[in-house]
Structures are given as C-alpha cells and as structure tokens.
Amino acid sequence: MGRNTALYKKNKLLWCVGGWFRKISNFAAPYRNRAPLTTMSKTIRIRKGLDIRLQGEAEKVLVQLDPAKVVAIKPTDFHGLIPKMLVKPGDQVKAGTTLFHDKYNERVRYSSPVSGEVADVVRGDKRRIMEVRILADTEQRYEEFGAGDPSTMNRETVVQKLLASGAWPMIRQRPFDVVADPAQEPRDIFVSCIDTNPLAPDLDLVVRGQGADLQSGLNALAKLTKGKVFLGVSDKTTAREFLDASGVVRHTFNGPHPAGNVGVQIHHVAPINKGDLYWVCGVQEVLSIGRLFNTGRLDATRVVAVTGSEAKNPRYVRTIVGCQMKELLGEVPAGVRIVSGNPLTGDRVANDGSLGFYHGQVTLLPEGDEPKFFITDGWAGPGLDKFSASRSYPTWLMPGKRYAMDTNQNGEERAFVMSGQYEAVFPFDIYPVHLLKSILANDIEQMEKLGLYEVVPEDFALCEFVCTSKIDSQAIVRQGLDELKKETT
Amino acid sequence: MKALRKTVDNLKPSFSKGGKLEKLHWVFDALETFLFTPGHATQRGAHIRDGIDLKRTMSIVITAMIPCLLFGIWNVGHQHFAAIGEFTVLGEGFWDKVLFGAIKVLPIVVVSYGVGLGIEFVFCSIKGHPIQEGFLVSGMLIPLVMPVDVPLWMVAVGTAFAVVIGKEVFGGTGMNILNVALTARAFLFFAYPTWLSGDKVWVSTDGMATVDGFSGATSMGHAAAGNSNGVVSLMDSFWGFEAGSIGETSAFACLIGAAILLITGVGSWRIMLSTFLGGVAMAAIFNWVSPGLPDTSTVKYFMSIPILHQLMLGSFFFGLVFMATDPVTATQTDTGKWIYGFLIGFLAILIRVVNPAYPEGMMLAILFMNVMAPLIDHYVVQANVKRRLKRAELRTA
C-alpha cells in the first residue's frame, strides 16, 4: 500500500506540473512498466508466480453456438449453499424464474437462465441436489424485471432487482469466497479484468463491443458500496471498454499468474483485515448484470474459451451458463478429462455435465491414469516433455516450449519436505506452509493471525501445482475457511 | 517394460489386503512405486501437477553426492598407500587405490542402507504408512561422514539409533528435528569417542607398517595441536588430498555437488551462501584477533589460518552443501534461512578453533542450529503476524 501511494503521489505531482513533464513521462511509460499518466492508473508489478505453458490455447475466433437445448444449474457451484427447491419436474419456467433459494437466506435466489420445462432434479449422495436440468424452449420467454439506469436508482432498488432476477449470486464475498449476503455492505468491490490462469480466455476479446453493458454493470456495483469499485486491468490490455469505464478506480497489474486473481489484486491494493468485507465479481458476471439493467431481462450469456491439448477446435464460443458439454464440445473420446473452468481450479464434469456458473473456460486434458515406468517417463526419466517449476527436468532450458500435460499426479502424497517452493509462486505477504499447517492443526486463532482472511482456495492453486509432496492445499484452505466461518459468524 | 508391469500386476493381489503377504504391503508398494510412477490421476484440486516428486528430488541429492563418494573411495586408497609408503605420488596406482577404497567404503554404504531401510520398512508396515524417500539420502550421507576404519557394527548401531530416535519417533520423513545422518554421527561420536576421533581412525593402514613420520591425524587434529607442519596446503585441502571422514575431504567434490543442487534448485542457495558468509566472518575475526595473542596460546596458530584455507579444511564445505541445506531440519522461511546459515558457519569455525574437545565444529554447529531452527522461524512468522495486526490498527485508526 505504502509503495503504491508513493507512486501515486509522484504521478500526481508530475500531473500538476503538466506539459512537458507529462509528455516525457508518457514517453518513458513503457520502460517503467507503468501505464501512461493520462489514465491516472498505478501499475502494480507481481513478481512471484508461474505461467504454466500448456498446448491448446483458444484461437481468437468467436463462434455463436446454436441455442442450448438442455441447461443445468448446479447448487454445488455455490460453496456452502443448501438449496430449497421452488420448482419441480414438469414445471414451466421463463428465463429469470427462480428455481431454488438459499435455505438459510431466502432472499438469495437462483434462477433459470432459459425458458422451458424443468426436466429433472439430479440428486447425489444423501439426496444432495447436484443439478436442476431444464429443457429449453426453442422460442425464449423472459421474466421482465424492468430496464433502467442503475446510477439513477437507490441501493435498495438495485439490490432488489439483482435478487429478484437471480443475478445476485454472481457477486461473491471475501473473505470465505461464498455468495455475498445482501444484508451486508462491503467496504469496496473488486473486479479483475485479467485472467492469468493456464490457457485462460482473453478478457479483452470477451468484452469487445460490450462497453455499455460493462458500464451499467459497474454502475450497479457502485451502488452496492459506499466505498469504491476497483478495476484490475492488465498493463497489456488494449480494450477501450476496460480503459474507458468510468466511476471506477483502475489499477494496472503486470506479472505472471496469479496476478489476475482478484485476491492477489486486493492484497496489493487494500489487504483484507479481520472484520473487513469485500465483494468481488467477474467480468462476464458484470456484463450479465449490465444487461439486466439495460434490457430488464436476465441474460446469462457467456463467452467460453474451449481450450486444452485434447480440444479438436480450440476457440471461443458464445453460449449460456449451464449449457451441456455435449452441445459445447460434441462427443469427447474416453481418456479425455473435461474440466469446466481452468486446469488449476476447474471442476471435472462428464460429457452430459454442464458449464459451471462462474466459468468462462472449458479445458480438455488427457487423462493420466496409466503407470509410468521410472526410467522412460517416470521420476528418473529424461523428462523432455515434463513441465516443472523446479529445474529438476531439463525442460527449464526450453523457455518457449508448450506442454500437453496429463492429469497424472506425477508422484505420491508425502509429508512437507521442501521449503521455499510455495513462496516462489505465492505473491502474498503470508507464509503459506505455516498457514496450511495451522489449518491442519485446526488452530483457529493461528489461522486468523497468519492471514487466512486474505486467501481463498484458488490462490493456493499454484502452490498445489508445484508441490513436491503433492499436498492438496486448495482443499485444506477450503476446510480452514469453513472452520473459520463457523467460528466467526 | 510391459512384461515387468504384468509381473507387478500379477504379484499385487498377494500383497493387498486379504492377500497372503498382506504384511509386506508397504514394502511392495515402495518397490512398485519405485519402478512405476503410479497411475494416480488427480482427484481434487488442480487437475495438472508439476513433474517433480520426492523421488526425483531425492535422486538429485544422491547424484550430487556421487562426486564426494567417488573421490572418497579413491582418497581412502590414496591415504592408505601413502601411509605405508607405496604409490606416494598422486597419479600412481589409481586402480589399486580405488580397489582398496571400494573394499573399505562400499560395505559401510551397504550396512547403512540395509539397516536404515530395514527399520523404515518395519516401522512403515507397523504404522501402515507408505515408505517415504527420506532415508535414501540419509543412507548415503552416513557413510560419507564416517571415518574409514569405523567397525561395521558401529555403523549399524549408529544408523539404527538415528532412524529410530532421530526420525521415526517424531513421525518419519519430514517430521524430524535433527538431521538424521548427523544424529548417527553424533551418537557414535559421544558413545565411542575413540573410534570417531583421535589419530587412529582416519587412515586405514590395515595393520601394515607405516612410513616414518606418519601420524594418521587429520589437518584439524594437527591444527588444534598447533602443529602447522601437519596441516595440508590450501590446494591439497581444496582437492581433498588429506585424511578425514570418507566423503568430507574434497571441497572440490562438494562444490560439484553444490552446483548440481543449485542448478536444479533442490538445495537452498540462501543457506549455502549465508553459511559460507558466516564461516568467513568468524575466520576473519580470528585472523584479526590472533596476532594479539601470546605465542604460548594453543589456539594462536589455528586462529591465524587464512580465511579460505580455514574453510577448505575439515568438513565445512561438506556440511554446508549437504547437511545445512536439509530442508526438513533447516528453517522454512527465507529470512530464517539467512540467519540459520550464517550462524552455522559462524559457530562451526568458532567451535572448531576454540573448543579443544572437538577438533571439528560443523557437526555440532548444524545440530545446534537444527534445534534452533523452529525458534528462528517462530520469530520470523511472528513479525509477519505483527505486521498484519499493525495494518489492521492503521486502517481502523
């Protein structure tokens, strides 16, 4: 914070002097790794991290898919949610009709993204609801929530509109990474306009031509907090939609993954302390919210990057939240894992599974369930096709190479042995291993002290990736957050 | 390879639950996972994982120790023949020296691995844990820090003590507080001091008559006695042509190991560098103090050895590269590593020069800092916690 404030003051001073200074300053901007002064933003450089170079990046073509025939909303996408069903199989719904609400917070409603007939409520173990499937009509009908400019509305109207339409769950809260509680008010709201995950979609492409919706969405978010709406943009972005958005404070970020994680951006702008509450929202979700206010309808359209070494046709497609993988990808052969989301944090889904609520990416990876002989392709092998953050395989000498990584764990789980590994990919002022150990010891006080409020599972995804001992740190962090939430609320 | 896989798959049922050899399940598991990285696909969390695992990490550390082992084998032979007055020139009798050294050293390696892995197998079978790879490194380190004439039963006892008391009682690999190999050495050092110190154990004479003027003492022993003639030259100590524990004498071989560990990123450069700096600091202080001491002072000569030479002698480099960097027993935090390493180097030279009972200080310095490591980490982490609390106060103020 201190460093950024200092940069800002320095910039402000130059701004005041104006004229030549500004010109010189702009001229030098690329060399200083900062955005030009004219955008009044502050570049924050993330040094720690790792870009995993995978094969199968989506080609920059956007294809409109046929309207989805079957769409599913998965209560499991919303951590900790216990749904109370309001519809049953056979019911007719419109796009925006509530399907279920949170059993413990009835105001938070979850709606159908399409109109049609409720086909099935798929249940898992202990009758837990896994999916609510809807057979879509060919002609879409919408619930009308009324169009209007959010900046002229009061907070309560905006909240009501978001809740009624089922757009509310698009807003999540930090700490704990759960759906925001409408009864609370956050300090600030953060939107990350960068996705740095492996093979992640280029959000510049996603937002292209959607400036008006983005602006309305941001205006709506601005109504929800007395604080600010922070926009984290990449130093390489050329999207005017991000750079021209008004009513927000922009920060420019530069660096490897996880620079695009909103948690990392919060940490470098205004770190979360005990008792702080922030809300976060993804770019595609902001667009949906914007469309809600511009058209009065719930429009859960998503641009999805189809990626991965096994994707036949890696490209961008426009479809809808919850659309089935079958329709998105066609038949996928056995031995290929379908991941809704990115390879680090996404969910494994079957061919008849559906796109996750917060996902704008689908990744197809080769399944790695074959044993590997130690000398040829196992631990003692030459490893010319193995990606590693360590330099224990010769591939570190080939910085441009891209890899078709499979889903093999590449080793067995072990006790913590190596040190310094997590720290190299973890751009937080937090000691990750000490934090994980405090969670494993279930020491609530220590978790708080070591900074658990500032992180969510996705921030540990890279730690989990690089771990020599193959420790599932994302699951541990989630367990810690659940414990902490139980104790503090 | 396919045939091998088939054999393994055929054998598997007898070692699984309900099989005839169920008790040996984890031993089988260890051998199976040695041959084949299992086909475990990721079940939760990140779908893709880094290519590195503990087996590869440990195999790199073992590779890094091979130059020390090979040089040690030759040097054991060289010291032997030099003592009995044959092949006194370095280049002469290379294969005789290697053969003699191999006959002396390899049994120690075999005993160390056999006893250590045997105990690990038994413990893991009883506890129902998979066998972890930690001992593969310890098993190689133990022979390298032994004097060549140590009896094999002593190696066995020391290894058993180190594995059981040093590691398994704490929960196995990753949980130990003290470096396992140094625990073995320290145990033997204090239990059988005449076999691990003095003049008789460093050079294997095999009972043959020695040349006149042969003492068998290490340079450390000579230096501690103030006998400057017995201390080998800077270059000899760099290459390692001197008496000492099997693997420790050659700073050059240790530096090759260091290069392997640093290039692959397995060893911590922070610890290596700070240990070196700590040693330099203490040696410099001694150099500075020594002219002021009376000539009768026993430590005057030892203190006056030039810095680089001081560090080349004894096991300073071996400990720096292979022992101080043990990630389990070292500090975990980056800041902590600087403090930890510096104090190891500093204390090692201090103990070696000033304490007459221990002619070499590296072992004790590392063990002492192993014990202190959690404390150092605690204060580093507490500073982080305080920073966080202060930030919260600033915000509310």
Image (cartoon, rainbow, N blue to C red):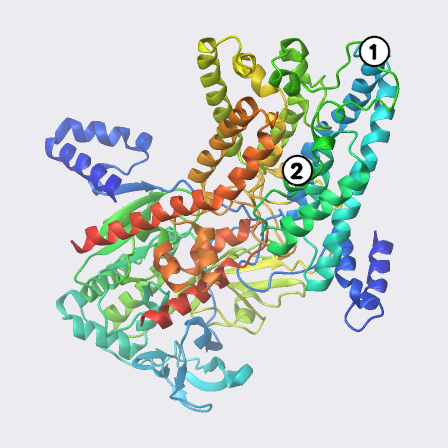
In the picture of the structure, the residue carrying the numbered disc 1 is: B211
The circle on residue A230 is none
Say whether residue A481 is left or right of residue A381: left
Say whether residue B376 is left or right of residue A220: right
- Amino acid at the residue labelled 1: Val
A436 shown above or below A326: above
A62 shown above or below B262: below
The residue that appears at 31% across and 42% down in the rendered structure is: A44
Q: Position of residue B275 (x, y in %)?
A: 51, 29
In the picture of the structure, the residue carrying the numbered disc 2 is: B190
A47 shown above or below A414: above
Within-10-Å neighbours for mark 1: few <14, some 14–19, many 20+: few
Q: Position of residue A288 (x, y in %)?
A: 32, 67
- Residue B177 in sight here: yes
Q: Position of residue B341 (x, y in %)?
A: 50, 33
- Amino acid at the residue labelled 2: Phe
Q: Position of residue A214 (x, y in %)?
A: 28, 59
Which residue is at the front of the view, B150 or A336?
B150
